[in-house]
Image (cartoon, rainbow, N blue to C red):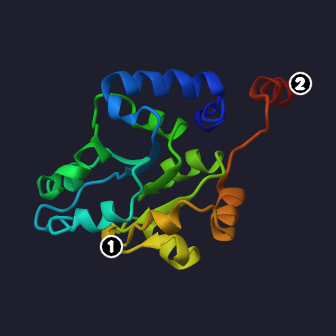
Amino acid sequence: MPYSWRLNQEEFKKKNYDKYCKHYPMLKGKKILAILLTGELDEDEENPYAEVNWNKIFDNLDDDWIIFTNSGKLLENMTHIGYEHRNQFVYSNRTFDTREVLSFAECLVTNSGLYATYFAVKQKPIYCLKYTNCQFEKYMKRKFSNLYIKNVEDIDMTKFSEFTSENEKFCEYFSYDCGENPSAKISEIFE
């Protein structure tokens, strides 16, 4: 069964959510903004997130939201977060399969076409964050410019938590959704 089909399955979502809440109790009852980045910067490249003003981002983030990331580059600057925001950030890399977060996230910011196409089945806000200048980032900048974020400080959940018409267009184009019953769809394919 394609991975993206699992993301809307309630038992899959519950299993993953419970597992993550066990390790990260601050997730319980919160909405998740997943910032999932892939790829490595060249050795001579500076960390583009070294000087991020995280307090600006968290000031635009309601208390019922948490940022979840797999990016060590984002983590490097987290020592500058104000005490009042420290429970609104979770870093997890290689502890679990990062794709599992997609099952219970409310919004995705990524530079990965794979993560974006998986998440499109959920019909929730998806944005592309400039990071390694990969092909997906270039495509998003060109074709879905309103969903392209050049600077991480431009993440504003007062706007990004809404499912816009451009999000809808992206999800419709990239979604692998088969409907309510994936098993029936698989049976239909093999008839």
Q: Could you tell me which residue is drawn at 27 percent across and 37 percent down?
A: 93
Q: Could you tell me which residue is drawn at 46 percent across and 63 percent down?
A: 157
Q: Could you tell me which residue is drawn at 65 percent across and 55 percent down?
A: 174
Quadrant of res 131: bottom left
Horizontal side, residue 184 vs residue 26: left or right:
right
Q: Could you tell me which residue is drawn at 31 percent across and 24 percent down?
A: 23
Image quarter (top left, top right, bottom left or bottom right) of the N terminus: top right
Q: Position of residue 138 (x, y in %)?
A: 45, 72
Mark earlier in primary sequence (2, 1) = 1
The residue to which callout 2 is attached is 191
Q: Nearer the viewer, residue 169 or 41?
A: 169
Mark 2 surroundings within 10 Å by alpha-carbon count, few (fewer than 14), some (14 through 19), many (20 or more):
few
Quadrant of res 45: bottom left
Q: Nearer the viewer, residue 116 or 151?
A: 151
Q: Which amino acid is tagged 2?
A: Glu
Q: Nearer the viewer, residue 41 or 95?
A: 95
Q: Position of residue 57 (x, y in %)?
A: 32, 64
The residue to which callout 1 is attached is 151
**Which secondary structure lies at badge 1?**
loop
**Which secondary structure lies at badge 2?**
loop
